[in-house]
Amino acid sequence: MVYLILAVLALYVVQTFLPSAIMSRAKGPEVMRYAGGPRDEPLELTVHAGRAARALQNMNEALFVFLPLALLSVLSDPGGLATWGAWVFLLARVAYVPAYITAVGLTRSIVWTVGHVGLGMMAWAVAATV
């Protein structure tokens, strides 16, 4: 489980760089000048950078649920269901980022739901050990 926690946190770190990377690719040196300055005025994001930023905000919200469940799983050793749930969550979150950025139909919502099923699996496993 510890490796899964680290993998989710690594994904989070990657997601923190995505909006800036997308903006840099779209607008070039202007973004670097903005990043090095006082940032008094917000920089208008491109469509894709805005989606990446919203995907990051969603990850912030999901981590609030995942991390306590994962730590409780480490402490209570609930067995395979919690680990499977963490894998489902991680893979869904990996898929969520491109699904959100590309905005293909209901893909984002479906992937988000799958990730929350993984959280439910983890919660069920932890609750069963109480």
Image: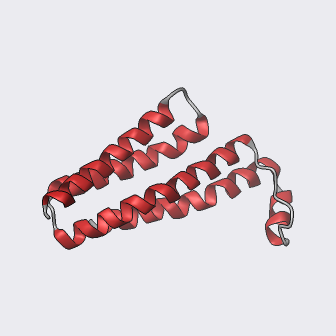
Q: Quadrant of residue 29?
A: bottom right
Percent position (x, y) of residue 80?
Answer: 16, 56
Percent position (x, y) of residue 39?
Answer: 83, 67
Task: Determine whether, in the image, residue 34 is placed left or right of residue 63.
Answer: right
Q: Is residue 43 above or below residue 13?
A: above
Task: Determine whether, in the image, residue 26 is placed left or right of residue 54.
Answer: right
Percent position (x, y) of residue 69?
Answer: 31, 62
Residue located at (38% from left, 67% from top):
6
Judging depth in this view, the residue of 6 and 68 nearest the camera is: 68
Residue located at (19% from left, 58% from top):
127
Q: Quadrant of residue 17?
A: bottom right
Judging depth in this view, the residue of 45 and 128 nearest the camera is: 128
Q: Is residue 55 above or below residue 129?
A: above
Residue located at (14% from left, 64% from top):
130
Residue located at (74% from left, 52% from top):
23
Percent position (x, y) of residue 94?
Answer: 45, 49
